[in-house]
Image: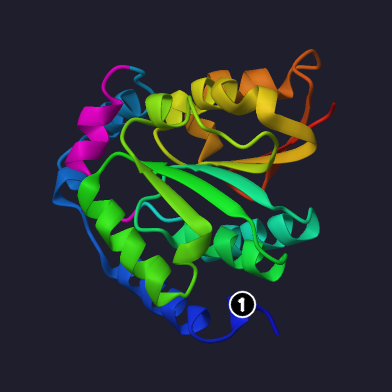
Amino acid sequence: MTTLTTEPLAPLLDRLFKEADAASSPAMAALSREERERLVRSKTEYLDLYGRLKDLWLPVSRETGTLLYMLARSCGAKSIVEFGTSFGISTLHLAAALRDNGGGRLITSEFEPSKILRARQNLADGGLIDLVEIREGDALKTLSTRLPETIDLLLLDGAKALYHEVLDLVEDRLKPGALIVADNADDCPDYLAHVRSEASGYISVPFAEDVELSMRAG
């Protein structure tokens, strides 16, 4: 039995995934495909884009959530950093792994206040709020200070254009063997080029349809 598969978390996640599947975003529907792709890859307009999408869930898939739990458990993670809380579905999976690893700390960053309120409630309902610190604001600022000495796992699931920049912020804290999971990684080609480069210090492979799984080699 695990925290992930028992009450109160398991039924909570079922409800949240169903709610996310049923949700829609008029703001997203109003954007053409070309405009959406441009905004997603912009390093200057991401606050405007995600502000417009504040009601959109943007969750990891059920499979990616389970993968996050498995990775954090298997590496014995005690210290996790997450870029992009949204409504907290990925946060719940990671915090469940910390609970089952005997405890730890998860620092996550989200700039949209309404999403933070919902994420806090979800974490409280899941019995995991004590393991999580949510930092409000632009991650380029919130994740630039007061990080743990070592980080076991990093999840990148915020503004795609900033994946490389956020990695740079925490890179010197990633311990050898630390795992980096980048969701929707195809939207951040400069990040992929970096972690797949032989000179980067990472071993990196695409996983499933939209995840890049990397490991700090040394």
Q: Which residue is drawn at 67% across and 29% down?
A: 173
Task: Give the side of residue 45 with respect to residue 110, left or right.
Answer: left
Seen in the picture, residue 83 relative to 96 is either above or below; the reply is above
Q: Position of residue 68 (x, y in %)?
A: 63, 56
Where is residue 34, by image quadrant?
top left
Q: Three-letter amino acid code at disc 1?
A: Thr
**Is residue 85 visible to us here?**
yes
Nearest to the observer: residue 138 or residue 161: 138
**Is residue 212 visible to us here?**
no
Nearest to the observer: residue 71 or residue 96: 96
Q: Residue furthest top?
A: 199
Where is residue 101, by image quadrant?
bottom right
Q: Where is residue 147 in the image (x, y as percent from the top left)?
A: 56, 34
Q: Residue at x 53, y 65 (%)?
A: 62
Check disc 1 and report the residue beneath it: 3
Nearest to the observer: residue 199 or residue 146: 146
Q: Position of residue 20 (x, y in %)?
A: 33, 65
Q: Position of residue 57 (x, y in %)?
A: 32, 56
Query: Magenta residues?
Result: 44-57
Q: Which quadrant is home to the C terminus?
A: top right
Q: How many labels does the image show?
A: 1
